[in-house]
Image (tube, grey):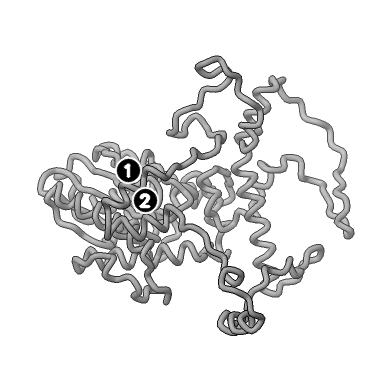
Amino acid sequence: MSDATKHAILSPSGADRWMVCPGSVKLSKGKPDNANVYSTEGTDMHEVAALCLEEDKQAADLVGCEMQSGSLLNEEQSEAIQNYVDAVRTYRDAVKGALKIEEKVPLTQITGEPEAEGTVDALIISQETEIVVIDAKFGRGVQVNVENNRQTKIYAIGALDKHELWDYVKTVRLVICQPRLKGTSERVVTVEELAAFKTEVGQAAQRVATEPDLLVPSDKGCKFCRAKAVCPALRDVSLPSIEGFEVEDSMDAVVANETKAPVVPERSEDDELEANMAKIPQIETWIKAIRAEVERRLLAGVPLKHWKLVQGKNGARQWTDEDDAVKKLKEFRLKKDQMYEMSLISPTSAEKLLKKIAPNQWKALQEVIIQKPGPKSVAPMSDDRPAILVGKPLGGFAVEPEEWSDLI
């Protein structure tokens, strides 16, 4: 969950940023946060999940209830929440431990930041020599890897400090629950590993104070950084030779000052291609951030010299009132099959109708359902998905170029 902290500038959720890029703290100061409909929904769902765990409720029983933001809990959200709640209860029962929900843990002794706290979504202190730290992620887009996850490790350190468990606990189970993506993943670490990481976090926090202008772009760090649209280091990674560029009033040309090309070691075409491919995530992050910041300023009434707001393409036409439209169409003597368009429900809609009330019928329906595999895409070697072998597959058939049209 987002950290409910006092002056939590060096928050666990932002550790991938400030531990790598100390200058991001100073550069982000005063910048508006990245709150949006997705983060608001996440906060809402965390609140409902906490309520279910604290009061032993089922999420399905709360469908239609108003959440913190004023939105009403829908069925899809309740299913994701219930998956998380079930996972927490399973861990609690397995380790026979005391469950603490939305547990505040101190951070000052880790980062040196006065009165700083973090909030652990679920903490289980077992009767044996293990604690479980569970972090819920209700987003649909970003798969979070529990391996080397700084956020959960900082939470674990805070929990060990708060409850004075360093001499009692031997291992800590770090759990990330993403019910809308791959579900639950975990990693077990020793207290010795966490003790070493605590030192690492403290050193990173010191760099924020001693190197406040050091900017180090990274895929994870830049993704949610509030200052990425104006970050010179990210700009330089994306456009290494931007110095001297001017934007003309007509916006028809960009003129660069002549500079002597630096001497660089020769690299093969493959090396150059792979190096440029590695830059793409940061470049895309930078581009999206710039567009969003320019739009935010214009929508806030801040004038810009070369950019303005314009009206986009009109949306699709709609009936002002469907009942009035039906009445008029009937006056025109149109038949029902002319007035209405009918289509078969999707497998997803069929699942919602049948899975709970008629599971056997839903099982039988699998015979007429297929699911095409996703398109091929390029990923780094660190990605946990298996590589696709291409060239001459089994059978000797060559791969057609058309099959790769969706690659990015």
Closest to the observer: 404 or 400? 400
Q: Is residue 226 above or below residue 319?
A: above
Given residues 351 and 237, the one toward you in this image is: 351
Q: Residues within 10 Å of mark 2 (few under 14, many from 20)?
A: many
First-in-chain label (1 vs 2): 2
Residue 270 location in percent, x, y? Answer: 66, 22
Rendered position, 353 above or below 91: below
Q: Secondary structure at mark 1?
A: strand
Q: Is residue 79 left or right of residue 224?
A: left
Q: Which mark is residue 185?
A: 1
Q: What number is the disc on residue 115? A: none
Residue 375 in the image: state x and y as whole percent: 55, 38
Q: Position of residue 254 (x, y in %)?
A: 85, 49
Q: Give 172 or 184, whichever is nearer the viewer.
A: 184
Q: Secondary structure at mark 2?
A: strand
Q: Residue 179's x, y, as percent? A: 35, 52
Q: Quadrant of residue 317?
A: bottom right
Kind of residue at badge 2 = Gln
> Which quadrant holds the N terminus?
bottom left
Which residue is drawn at the image coordinates 48% and 47% (left, top)?
207
Residue of label 2: 178
